[in-house]
Amino acid sequence: MCSAVRFVDGEGNLYFGRNLDWECGYGEKIVYTPADYDYQPAFNAEDRNHAVIGVGIIVEDTPLYFDCANDAGLTVAGLNFPGYAQYAEDSVNFTTNVAAYEFPLWVARSFTSVDDVAEALKNVTIVAKPINDQYPVAMLHWIIADATRSIVVEYTASGMHVYDDDIDVMTNQPEFPVHRQNLINYINCVPTMVKPVKWGGAELKPWGAGLSAHGLPGDPNSMSRFVRIAYANAHYPDKQGEKDNVTRLFKTLSSAAMIEGMSAMADGQYEKTMFTSGYSAKTKTYYMATYDDPTIVATPVSDFDAASDKLQTK
Ligand SMILES: C[C@H](CCC(=O)NCCS(=O)(=O)O)[C@H]1CC[C@H]2[C@@H]3[C@H](O)C[C@@H]4C[C@H](O)CC[C@]4(C)[C@H]3C[C@H](O)[C@]12C
């Protein structure tokens, strides 16, 4: 399973990140796509040459991003959405056609804000075209965020759906509106200290802190993670400075992290948080930690050669 989160610091700088929960990795690294990289969109999309940094793999000289950010502070992450995602079988005339594998790259290469993406998506077809035979089409939905807001993009049997994500988190299936509505079941959960009460003649005292959030779901399923990470994100106090905001990002994501052994997939393999990654628009830095090495490694955009036209990895 996967979970993603967005927030801004007191100065309005965007922080955005995700957990990648799966049974295996794909050899993913930090991939930098410079502005002058010769991006050849799969169909009729235009390349508008924003530089992009993120986590992904390179296939056929094309960066396949799992999550990424561009030089304008626009970020995007893909999360599993099987059983719901249904892309077009073929390109559709008079629309901008985007292959599912290039969706994060196309968004980050092309736009400067969530508003611009949302406007463009009114005339976009997402096509079920694989990059090659080795990598089948991944059934995903996406969260796209900037310093102003976030949206969730779901392409299903009924076409394109773009939702305003006013809660600034996303997980997996079902559709975003179901997750959003389900939050109402938990609005009794608050982070305050419960006071002792009297039931008849008996005084009942809380065990300690945390009782006011009793009922928050602790299990790893997607709807439960959505509630948990939404609660964590909504209640985390504002922080000053890069260090404390990166801590906030990784701690918030850890509230929805998958520990090996908790949840087996259909093939019997356990899911685990293969990596947690995220972007700070304040310092233009990508951060990443893996399951086996929780050290948060910082990779600033300035580590790469922006004048080159070649894909670069770290
Ligand atoms: C498995 C990843 C999603 C993790 C997730 O959401 N897990 C939830 C599990 S569950 O359903 O809720 O059980 C997704 C996110 C991004 C995906 C990758 C990216 O889309 C880039 C390419 C796209 C190619 O078509 C397939 C390989 C691939 C390299 C994808 C492999 C895989 O589908 C990834 C890595």
Image: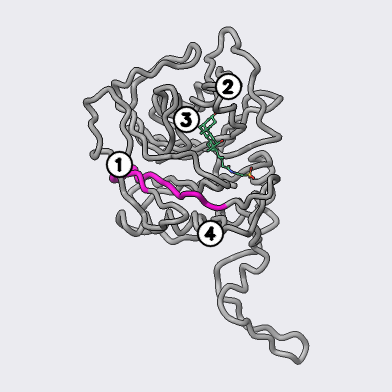
Query: How far apart, in angstroms, are the residues tagged by discs 2 and 4?
Result: 32 Å
Residue 208 vertical position relative to residue 28 in the rendered view, above or below: below
Say if the magenta span includes residue 60: no
Query: How far apart, in angstroms, are the residues tagged by discs 3 and 2?
Result: 12 Å
Residue 96 in percent (x, y) is at: 52, 15
Q: Specify the segment rendered in magenta.
A: 272-287
Residue 255's mark? 4
Query: How far apart, in angstroms, are the residues tagged by discs 1 and 3?
Result: 18 Å
Identify the residue at the far right of this view. 200
Q: Secondary structure at mark 2?
A: strand
Identify the residue under disc 3: 104
- Label 3 amino acid? Pro
Residue 251's mark? none
10 Å crowding of disc 4: few (<14), some (14-19), many (20+): some
Ligand 1 rendered quadrant: top right
Q: Secondary structure at mark 1?
A: loop
Disc 1 + disc 2, Cβ < 8 Å: no
Q: Secondary structure at mark 4?
A: loop
Identify the residue under disc 1: 284
Residue 126's mark? 2
- Label 1 amino acid? Lys
Identify the residue at the far top of this view. 93
Report the front residue among 144 and 33.
33
Q: Secondary structure at mark 3?
A: helix
- Label 4 amino acid? Ser
Sequence-earlier tag: 2 or 4: 2
Sequence-earlier tag: 1 or 3: 3
Q: Is most of the magenta stretch helix, strand or loop?
A: strand
Residue 213 in percent (x, y) is at: 62, 67
